[in-house]
Amino acid sequence: MRHLFLFALLLLLGCRDRAPSRSDEAAIPASGERATAVSAAPTPEAVTADEPPGDAGRGRELVAQYECRRCHEGTGLAAEPLTRHCVSCHTKVMAGGFDERPKAAEWKQHVAHLSVVPSLHAAGRRFDRGWLVRYLLEPHDLRPALTQAMPRLPLSREQARDIATYLASLGPDERAAQPEASGEGNPERGRAVMDAMQCGSCHRMTGVKPLAAATPLGPEAPTTYQRSAEEKRPAVILAPDLKYTRERMRRERLVAWLLDPAAMKTDTLMPKPGLTPEQAQDVAAYLLGAALEPAPSPAVPAPLPNLDRRVPYEEVAKAVLDVTCRHCHGNPDEAIGDGGPGNTGGFGFRKRGINFTSYEHAQGGYLDDAGKRHSLFEPMPDGTPRLVAALWARHREVAGKPDPTVRGMPLGLPPLPPEQIQLVATWVAQGRPR
Amino acid sequence: MTTHSRSSTPALVFALAAALGLTMTAPRAEACGGGWWPEVQAIDYRVQGIASAEKDLAEGRHLAAAGKVIRMIPHIRAYSKASSDLIVNRSLRVLAVASARSGGDLSKLADELPSDLKESFAGMSDEARTENLRWSVKALKALRKSKKDDVTLKTELAEAMAALPETKAKARKTLEKLARKDLITTPEAYRALGRLRAEAGNTDGEAHALERCRTMARDAAICDGQAAAPGES
């Protein structure tokens, strides 16, 4: 029975990769529209806004409600058992713990990205609270070698504040004495120190000349599974893109971190670099002040026209629903009552009753906030069926244009390629043939 | 008598020794409170069985689906309400829908039915077939009680109710409501709605429902009442 549950959980959990948000069905590009480039850069106001303090007690309750501990360590709450812990289960898959299962090799391709997840130990003490709030509301890719999988949770700003305040209250470490930030530091010297330390062996810093590295990191591969052995090292996977440092950390905390990372975060994989206080000031000056080349704006691809041939359900299920959607929109009857966050609820999401495990269930619609059921294929104001609109919404979220009215799908994963959306759109347009 | 006792004693000893030997040589064992117990790994083959029956049902092989359920859980008709065992519930659903789509006629499975059910469950007579349809409705209603927001179950219940004179009106009301919201989940239910509309003299509505049925169905022939799937004849 235990194995059955694990199997069911695997079906529910292991999809593919990446991050969440919402999007505008009215703004979903119509067929034939040209690709639109939109900026994904966070607005300076949002980054620097001073957030009023939240309620740590409520924050703790929210961390439990949103089930952060199913993926993250360091939440201040007891860890979930294996059957409910995404990372432990995925790690077991990757370590061959389910190799006797016929689909183990396939699972490995889908769950590799979630076998390493940053711990939240001391997150609230390291990071700027305003940034934490903003990241919780609109998570985005921070780590080049980690496939982003942080879902965009249904959080209000107040709730995000409460969580950030709770995280800040966790385990103050007496060793993390923060030195006086004396002087401004010299960014040129800082860059020289970083090259001498070969920070580029783990980190990228987008927008500046590549950092020197012992083993240069290769071009970014689309999925963690396809990355080189070097880039599968946890330290590399978890190394953030240093261009975000200026948004995430304040100067004095950054200097303290550079001097002794483990004093601030006991489980960090960042080695102690052995810097002098002056060198730490210089490196901080570079990280916080180096001029960054503007990043290329992510584009929302243009939709493809519907196919001329018949597209049956089986083809859509095989290409999209079975491999991407049913992990969260499962059948509770096949998983001891847990239909996944997109069906029976979870990760703070209310029950939506969406089930993609069979043809019949895929026709069954979704529950709105009032508990009323609607079709997944009802047209949005621009005529796009809701299901298709949600798939395009995900593209817009990744491009930094989330929409409050439609949550992009797949949640927390990369957008589907236009060819897959085309398949779904054609199937819907043809009347959803079995 | 004496001779018999003498010959049975060594046999008994041998049997005991063999049983002990089998226990001692079990390939895997776990210690428990200082004693040794053979490790038994229970495999619930019903998981594969119900998955296969559901596939048969989805692909139109109603009798095959019903047969698999009956072979797996011969006493299934004894369940009068949803079980805490989800596989039993899935089996109830498959059998109820398969029976309804077969018009209550499971006579081809008669040889596989328990003897006490053979008369009624096989659907040999009109009365027995009607009784089977009533059982389908009852079973689906029982399942609906535990899953009120399952629209697939709602559709299938309405489809089964459409086959009984006493529940046709309610079936039509339910199916019309679902159709308005584009929530009818099967082509078979559109077929049932088409027939109900035809009986009410709504020919345009019938045509529309049957058109939806033909669009959704893998084999449009099922919408015209030719429901036999490959291997079902």
Image: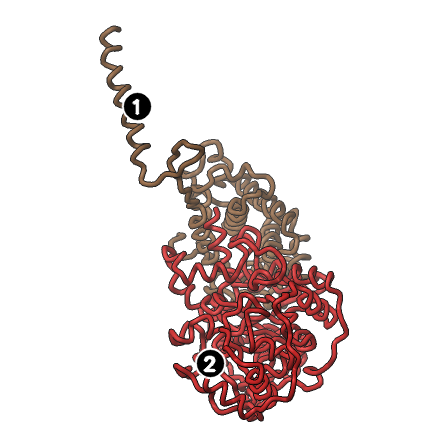
SS category of the residue bearing label 1 = helix
Q: In the image shown, does B43 or B140 lie closer to the viewer?
A: B43
Camera-nearest residue between A335 and B202: A335
Give residue B73's position: percent from left, percent from top. Answer: 47, 40
Letter of the chain that mark 1 sits on in the rendering: B
Counting from the top left corner in percent of width and height, residue A64 is at 65, 59
Q: Amino acid at mark 2?
A: Asp
Mark in the foreground, 2 or 1: 1
B143, above or below A233, in the image: above
The residue pinned by badge 2 equals A308
Viewer-closest of B231 and A383: A383
Q: Where does the image place residue A196, in percent across and percent down from the top left?
A: 45, 86
Please give the count of numbered marks on the rendered protein. Answer: 2
Q: Is residue A329 visible?
A: yes
Chain identifier of the red chain: A
**Residue A48, relative to residue B18: is it above or below?**
below
Q: Secondary structure at mark 2?
A: loop
> Which residue is label 1 attached to?
B16
Q: Colour of chain B?
A: brown
Quarter-of-image position of residue A165: bottom right
Left or right of B152? Residue A107 is left
Q: Residue at x 73, y 64 (%)?
A: A56
Labels 2 & 1 near each other (Cβ < 8 A): no
Residue beneath the point at 61% across and 58% down: A344
Residue sitting farthest toward the top: B2
Instruction: From the top left corner, tell me how far across and down residue A204 is, in percent.
Output: 49, 83
Residue situated in front as seen by the camera: A410 or A6: A6
Q: What is the distance, in whole Å, between disc 2 and disc 1 at their CAs?
A: 73 Å
Check the image and name the residue furthest to the right. A52
In the image, residue B41 sits, relative to residue A216, either above or below, namely above
The N terminus of chain B: image quadrant: top left
